[in-house]
Amino acid sequence: ASDTVYRASTTAPVNIAVVKYWGKRDAKLNLPTNSSLSVTLSQADLRTLTTASCSARYPASEGDSLLLNGEPSDVSGARTQACFRELRSRRAALEAADPSLPKLSTMPLRIVSENNFPTAAGLASSAAGFAAFVRAIANLYELPASPSELSLIARQGSGSACRSLFGGYVAWRMGDKADGSDSMADQVAEASHWPEMRALILVVSAAKKGVSSTSGMQQTVATSGLFQERITKVVPKNMELMEKAIAEKDFPAFAEVTMRDSNSFHATCADTYPPIFYMNDVSKAAIRAVETINANVGRTVAAYTFDAGPNAVIYYLEKDTEAVVGTFYHVIGDTDGWKKDVLKGLKPTMSLD
Ligand code: PMV
């Protein structure tokens, strides 16, 4: 009937890169200057839940809409529009091939999305957000698309979102085609391949980041001399070493590449003109704490990484929980800035699924 409301829901998890995406070779299509690799975190801890619906009875004058954590959110941005357009055109193709299908592609879409973590906490909410957004609409439209195909669409919403369509260990291959048709994600290993992996998130600041990833990347590509070295030499090597470390479940190797790659990314930011600093003194205290923990244990049991903000993500193995999480409180407890603001933000450890 013409008043039918069609509906589909899905969830998508957050991912945290261990080899970072930083730099666009095509800002419109979100094509990266380098490949990247991430670990997808457990949905029990951090995820976006999204419901997409459409109906002929939704007024056309209202157009498409998005309710994010209960608040109306702007959908007119080029990235969001690109996702709507790509999904609609795929649905329209199905409808053209099978005239018995309802014409969902012509109906306004209503998207309702909720995070189970603070959106403004600088916890890569856009990755889970766009991944859930794209999959919810793809499910509603019954598109016969694989996760890699959906990653091509989610990438256009937010680059890192393409990696949240898979669990476990995920690579985003940069590709080399101008239309971006080969710039998509694939799964390097299931979470069950290395189920001992854990991530600890230290919320240094819940404030929204100062320089957006889009403008930070643009400034880095335009003004950093180190950046060329990073994309031509450092990252290709790190991708190779990281895939090997995951295949062999070699934590010290995984940790060294993770920390080196985070440092390299933040070095290119400091090398822009004017410089961009995402880490603050509290972030640096977390780095020192990881170094102290590793030195005290006598082997590498913890690895830090930072995205475009001051919050730390610490990777470690379940068997080293006591040494890492226990000691973290102890080591950073006396550092200014941690006691009041940070320790209460220490989230429980997370498993991967
Ligand atoms: O997906 P974006 O545009 O929010 O960029 C993410 C950039 C980093 O988080 C710093 C690195 C990454 O690979 O996720």
Image (cartoon, rainbow, N blue to C red):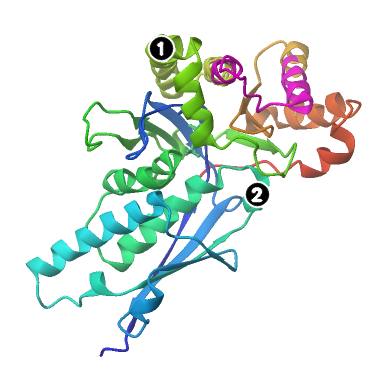
Residues shaded magenta: 264-291
**Marks 1, 2: nearer the viewer:** 2
Extreme residue toward the front, this view: 274
Asked where in the image residue 61 lies, by quadrant, the reply is bottom left
Judge by depth and name the residue closer to the eye, 59 or 160. Answer: 59
**Residue 283 included in the magenta stretch of the image:** yes
In the rendered image, the vertical position of residue 70 relative to residue 335, given as above or below: below
Q: Left or right: 35 with respect to 99?
A: right
Q: Can residue 20 be spotted in the picture?
A: no
Looking at the rendered structure, the number of numbered marks drawn on it comes to 2
Q: Residue at x 34, y 85 (%)?
A: 57
As rendered, which of 184 and 63 lies closer to the eye?
Answer: 63
Mark toward the start of the polypeptide (1 vs 2): 2
Q: Which residue is mark 2?
A: 120
The residue lying at 83 percent from left, 31 percent from top is 329
- Tags 1 and 2 in contact by the CB under 8 Å rule? no
* Mark 1 within 8 Å of ligand 1, using the beta carbon: no
**What residue did someone put label 1 on?**
237
Place residue 252 in its image quadrant.
top right
